[in-house]
Image (spheres, helix red, strand yellow):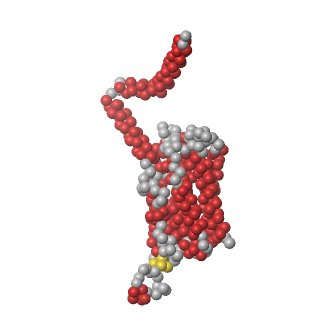
Amino acid sequence: MLDPVVNFFTRLFQWIGRGIGFIIGVVLWPFMWAGRWYGQRGWILKGGIGLVILILLGFYGRFFYITQWWNAFDPDYPAAEVAAAGTAGAGEPVQPEQSGDAQNLTTATQPTSCKPSAIAAVAADLIDFNVNRNAWISSTLLSKAGLFGLDWRRTPFFDNKAAFQLGINQVLRRTTTELVDTLGRVRGTSQIDENLQKARTALAWDETAWYIGWRGPTRPTPSVYREAIADLRTFNTSLEQCKATFDPRADNLMLFLDRIASDIGSTSDILRARIEASDAGWFDPRADDRFWFAYGQLYAYYGILTATQSDFANVIAERNLKTLWDRMESQLRASLDVQPWIISNGDESSAFFPSHLATMGFNLLQVRSNIVELRSVLDR
């Protein structure tokens, strides 16, 4: 009595098996044909083709390694770069610690050094993280070539680190611009610091430059960015020797916070646009690069804003901003704990496909609202 039912399901699974076998055969046919063709060639041609295949495998193997291993990634990195805030702002004279008669012999009018800029130090460390402790992905040859012609942005994993690095670089470009235009000079009529200007110019270099460009030979991006590390550290050395300028005024801090809030707001709008454009859940190929770009921004701004509290310690103390600032830093650090293995861009009301872009957008707007609150207190 059950024989017809059993026979139906038997035939059904046979058809499914044949269908799967047919699909696998279609996929493997080019490789099987290439294997037969390769086996019929002479040893010289075999050796040449084999060498090319080995080189390609080596290139793709290295690319897999540099995109999947994130060296020196540490959300708590600012603690190692930013010294205790104290009460002095960056560029202000500091006295060495002395005791007894030696302290009595040193007067307050004879400073031996000035406080270096934590912002410049963290910016240099972030560039070092991007191009020295990790390979700069966007300018590598395979990044430009894609996966046998397929853009890496259409793959689920191989563009994440590149997007993360680009998010950090966006923050570095903003920070060096503010160092040149406002923070590293007195008012708008004083001379621009040469080292900061060179650092800003270096970071404005094309993010995807290789050894050869459309106009001929050029310099690859990492080598140019490395010059910015040296320029920022040279500026800090001059500042520590009281030979450079850092102007930690309340209006400069307010302007810097304005620019950061604007930058974060722009990224949150990019996330919103992607959320509206697709709700494919785990299968949205562009959600991951949007997410990790925003994550890179938060990662970098966490260090820059921690450094800003040190550089503007006098202003923060005078305006009684420390509690608000610490709360902002705490919330910013908490947002860095969101590190999903696969990024999902699902409907926000879905029970099965989470919306990681919505979560990141919320974190961005939360940080932005804290910055706006700090700015409003400064403006009173």
Residue 247: x and y in percent read 56, 74
Q: Residue at x 64, y 67 (%)?
A: 375
Residue 145: x and y in percent read 49, 42
Q: Quadrant of the N terminus?
A: top right
Check the image and report above or below for 26 versus 324.
above
Residue 230: x and y in percent read 44, 65
> Quick one: 226 or 291, which is closer to the camera?
291
Task: In the displayed orientation, state which residue is furthest to the top.
Answer: 1
Residue 129 seen from this side? yes
Residue 63: x and y in percent read 43, 45
> Quick one: 24 or 206, which is closer to the camera?
24
The image quarter in which residue 317 lies: bottom right
Q: Quadrant of the C terminus?
A: bottom right
Q: Residue at x 46, y 74 (%)?
A: 240
Number of numbered discs visible in the structure rendering: 0
Residue 185 seen from this side? no
